[in-house]
Image (spheres, grey):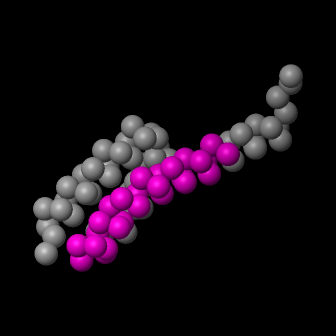
Amino acid sequence: MVETTSTTVAYMFGAIIGSLLAGALIGLIPFFLGRKYGKATLGIVGLVVCILCNFLLGMLLSIPACLVFVLIIMLTRK
């Protein structure tokens, strides 16, 4: 099968959307913890950072970023 421009574009589009969705799923952990413990801003920042990290290096970077934000939220909770 010969790869055409449309299949390459479709593949890249799928990879980008999948990466962003996976990062959002991981980022929901600090988001909801931040809302629960009164650190909503920190939770939103954690969500955005997890999305960006997953876009750059996948789960290899987004899971540690999630854990860092969860740790910060838990240590600074009210």
Q: Residue at x 21, y 64 (%)?
A: 73
Left or right: 11 as drawn, with respect to 18: right
Residue 41 image point, x, y percent: 31, 74
**Quadrant where the N terminus is found in the figure:** top right
Left or right: 53 as drawn, with respect to 36: right
**Measured along the vertical axis of the image, is residue 41 above or below residue 5?**
below
Q: Residue at x 75, y 43 (%)?
A: 9
Residue 76 image point, x, y percent: 14, 67
**Measured along the vertical axis of the image, is residue 35 above or below residue 47?**
below
Q: Residue at x 71, y 39 (%)?
A: 11
Depth check, front residue: 72 or 6: 72
Q: Residue at x 31, y 74 (%)?
A: 35
**Measured along the vertical axis of the image, is residue 59 above or below residue 52?**
above
Q: Main secondary structure of the magenta part?
A: helix
Res 42 → quadrant: bottom left
**Measured along the vertical axis of the image, is residue 33 above or below residue 69?**
below
Residue 20 image point, x, y percent: 54, 53
**Quadrant where the C terminus is found in the figure:** bottom left
Kindly give the residue lying farthest to the front in the view shown.
36
Q: Which residues are magenta?
A: 14-40
Kindly give the residue lying farthest to the top in the view shown.
1
Left or right: 21 as drawn, with respect to 12: left
Depth check, front residue: 77 or 53: 77
Q: Does the magenta portion include 17?
A: yes
Tag count: 0
Confirm whether residue 52 shows in the render.
no
Confirm whether residue 15 shows in the render.
yes
Q: Does the magenta portion include 30?
A: yes
Residue 63 image point, x, y percent: 35, 45
